[in-house]
Each structure stands twice: as structure tokens, then as C-alpha cells.
Image (tube, rainbow, N blue to C red):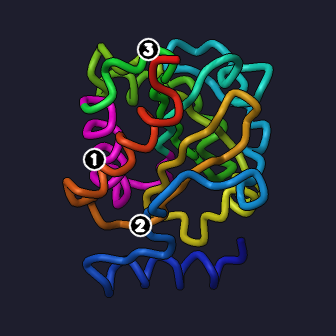
Amino acid sequence: MARQEKLDAWRDIIRDEVKTLHPPPARLYSAKRAFSFPSVEAVGLDGQPARLAADGLFASRLTLLGVSGSRFSEAMVESWLGGVESATRELPTMQTLRLSLVEGAALGWLQRPLLWSMRAGVPAERRGSFYCHFGDADPVRQQLRMENRFLGYVCVVDSAATVRWHVHSSEEPADKDVSRLASLLLAEHGAR
């Protein structure tokens, strides 16, 4: 992303208290409308490498994934994840993951101290499901249809690494939106 585009994206967030670039869809995407999640190399908060891909973290599980690239997006992401997680506790085949996109060449050099700092700020019960991608995230964001790096992004990814639902916004979800997504997941992936 060019420097001017980054500044424009940041200004959009500062100007608007709430911005939604992709609202929550009313249903899971059909096979025709769904799109592939890119294979993403990441590092867990424990420093171990991981890969978000069909043969990696997504293998054999439905995944609710929250992606943030800035502090502006954290409240939105956590509201979606926490709400859906609470409403789908009886769905044992679903996992919840968090991905932080850490961009900038200088930050890559500081990977170890940044992981340590993040680990200290993440509640113990979430550390095992929290991952960081260091480096250029533009290709990842483009494939995921993330238009603004400062907005939150939440998606549902199936075991074939296909995005079946996503929202891209700074707006925290309404209870009805969280309930709708939880109901969709329970209907499609509940007890079989």
C-alpha cells in the first residue's frame, strides 16, 4: 500500500466514529460467493511458527477468525469474537483464533520483544489462539477484501480455508448481528 493510501485510510478512521466497508451478511456465503483465505505464515505468542491454511490451523475445523492491524480495530474484533464464542459453546467443532497483522520492516526486527509485549497484554486463556503475521500484509488484505488496515475484520473460515462469511468495520456488532451469526453457524455446523 502506498504511503498516501495509508494516510487516507488512517484519516478515514479519524474522521468517522463508525465506518463499515463490508456489513455482516445475513447468511453464510454459497460456494459461488465464497473466496479463498490466503496461506498466511504466522507466529504464536509462544514464538512457535504456524500457518493459517487448510493443512495448517484450519485443518478439520471451522474457524471464527478476528484480524486486526491496529488498536482502532480491537474493540470491534473482540465484540464479535466474544459474543459469537459465548453463543456457540455447544459447537465443539469450531475454534476461535486471533491474528494481528504487524507491518513495517522495523517491526520485523523487533519480533521477539513485540511477541513478549503482546503476550503480556493478552489474557492467559487466549494466548494459545493468538497469532501474529510480521511483514508486508498487503497481499493478505487484498485477498481477504480488507480495504482499510485500521478497521477490524472478522470472518468464518471452513476447513478447506474458504471464507464463508466476513465483516469489515470499526463498528461493534449489535446483539442481533451476533445472534444471527451464531444461529447460522449452529444451523450449518451444529450436531449432525
Q: Nearer the viewer, residue 51 or 21?
A: 21
Residue under numbered circle 3: 92
Look at the numbered disc 2 and give the secondary structure of its residue.
Answer: strand
Structural crowding at the residue carrying mark 2, measured as other residues with C-alpha within 10 Å and reported as few (<14), some (14–19) or many (≥20): many
Q: Which residues are magenta?
A: 67-86
Badge 1 amino acid: Ser
Structural crowding at the residue carrying mark 3, measured as other residues with C-alpha within 10 Å and reported as few (<14), some (14–19) or many (≥20): few
Q: Position of residue 58 (x, y in %)?
A: 67, 25
Q: Quadrant of residue 76?
A: bottom left
Residue under numbered circle 2: 169
Is residue 137 magenta-colored?
no
Q: Is residue 43 above or below residue 146?
A: above
Q: Is residue 97 above or below residue 4?
A: above
Residue under numbered circle 1: 179
Label 1 vs 2, first from the N-terminus: 2
Count how many numbered circles sit on residues in the image: 3
* Residue projecting furthest to the left: 175
Cα–Cα gap, marks 3 and 2: 28 Å
What predominant SS class does the magenta segment belong to?
helix
Badge 3 amino acid: Pro
Badge 2 amino acid: Ser
Look at the numbered disc 1 and give the secondary structure of its residue.
Answer: helix
Residue at 40% in and 18% down: 127
Q: Are marks 1 and 2 in contact (CB under 8 Å)?
A: no
Cα–Cα gap, marks 1 and 3: 18 Å
Label 1 vs 3, first from the N-terminus: 3
